[in-house]
Image: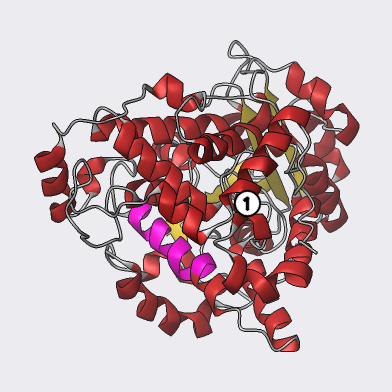
Amino acid sequence: MAVERERIRALNSAPLRKDSAQYVIYWAQMNRRVESNHGLLHAIEIADRLGLPVLYYEGLTCSYPHANLRLHTFILEGVPDTECRLKKLGIGYVFSLRRRTADRNDTLYRLAKHAAAVVTDDYPTFIARTHNTRVPAKLDIPYIAVDSSCIVPMSVMAKREYAAYTIRPKIHRELKTYLKAAGPIRPKHKWPASHQPEMQAMHTTVERGAIPQLAASCEIDHSIKPSPTFTGGRDAAEKRLQYFLKHNLHRYAKGRNEPSEQATSRMSPYLHFGHISPLEIALAVEEHAAQHNLNAAEYLEELIVRRELAFNYARFVDNPQSLGNLPEWCQKVMEKHSKDKRDPEYSPEQLERAETHDELWNATQKEMLHRGIIHGYYRMYWGKKILEWSPTFQGAVDTMVEIHEKYALDGRDPNTFTNILWCFGLHDRPWFERPVFGALRYMSLDGMKRKTNTRAYIDEIRYLETTGKDPAANYRPQA
């Protein structure tokens, strides 16, 4: 089955290298997986036409913003899974680990000298967005970006959508076309042993038991420790999905906004780093729901409609974290209330260290510091309070972005930016007027106490903080 043309964008006009080409490159920037990967499938399509094998290239540098032990470890944990699966399929693999800023940073360009084309991920934020702008002009072969991050390709939406209610019917109309399994990975031409020696000099072998030592050798921030909750990689993603289907899907709709219920999927780190695709999750959820007579509509709404609204937003704006992207009514609110007194007022450093008067808010920040995520419902509260306690609106958004980039395993993602800007009115509507917030939606501690078991959550995070062990790491449902 051919990759849908709506997923494919040629980002330069260079011709294929034919006579001297040795392979076609798939560059895994964001979709770090083998299965259900339309970018890899398209690379195979090109390679099959040319009679060539495929080389899967994946890099990890020490120079990305806030490079740290948590993020590095999560990515490294996925490498052995990828290498094992590619070897079985006859696809070449180079994983390049740039440990120090003094090390050379040109592996892709060296590999491209012998390639017919480069296929990569179409992704609207973080480093992939930058690479896909700058790299194509530097190559003399085709550079093709493929959307394997969304179920309905981003290009199907011709313009920016302003709320879930505007994109929802458009998404639902397209699902019958795109909500189907990606094609099987069957390259016609296997990676030849003769290519292996020249690749070994560029390849970093990652053995699962040696990951701590490998990460320790990198010139990164070692103060932000790996998450006790999340292990990276394809195997971990598949196990987490199966646990969610078996234990949590049937109670998701009722328990998703109650953190103590542990009813969510917590797939966001795996989606962000591409260890699993939303397409795979959606198909598995639909199948499980049908077999067990469950209604999965609320979960699929979050996974498909809300997530793809975020990708749509990021695709059509220049800077996804800019307050300038907010609707006009939000701009007027911020202008009107920019001088309102904040009481209390906290610095970014105090917020990062979870040093506020609010025990619940401190727990949400500590969940970020230790687990690398915040429960979705409490993350809204977390963001609203940063808005309320920061001297300026711009300072508030900067603090939220900075914390996510340093600590979050699902940060730098389209969902990150839309979740943050939702606190300032993005994809929302005007509410009642009040100080600081104006007509922006307000969230209160009393409201959290009425709606959720705040004490259970605070105690859970305190245990995590004091022991370094996560009592909810395996998603054990409450008895």
The percent position of residue 119, horizontal first and vertical second, equals 56, 51
What is the three-letter code of the residue carrying label 1?
Answer: Gly
- The dominant secondary structure in magenta is helix
Which residue appears at 39% of the width and 63% of the height?
309
Secondary structure category for the residue under label 1: loop
Q: Magenta part of the protein: which range?
A: 302-315
Determine if the magenta segment contains residue 304. yes
Residue 176, compared with residue 117, is above or below; it is: below
Q: Nearer the viewer, residue 345 or 228?
A: 345
Which residue appears at 57% of the width and 49% of the height?
454
Question: Which of the 4 image quarters holds residue 172?
Answer: bottom left
Q: Determine whether, in the image, residue 440 is placed left or right of residue 17.
A: left
Q: Nearer the viewer, residue 9 or 448?
A: 448
Residue that mark 1 sits on: 274
Q: Mark 1 packing: few (<14 Cα in 10 Å), some, or many (20+)? A: many
Determine if the magenta segment contains residue 393. no
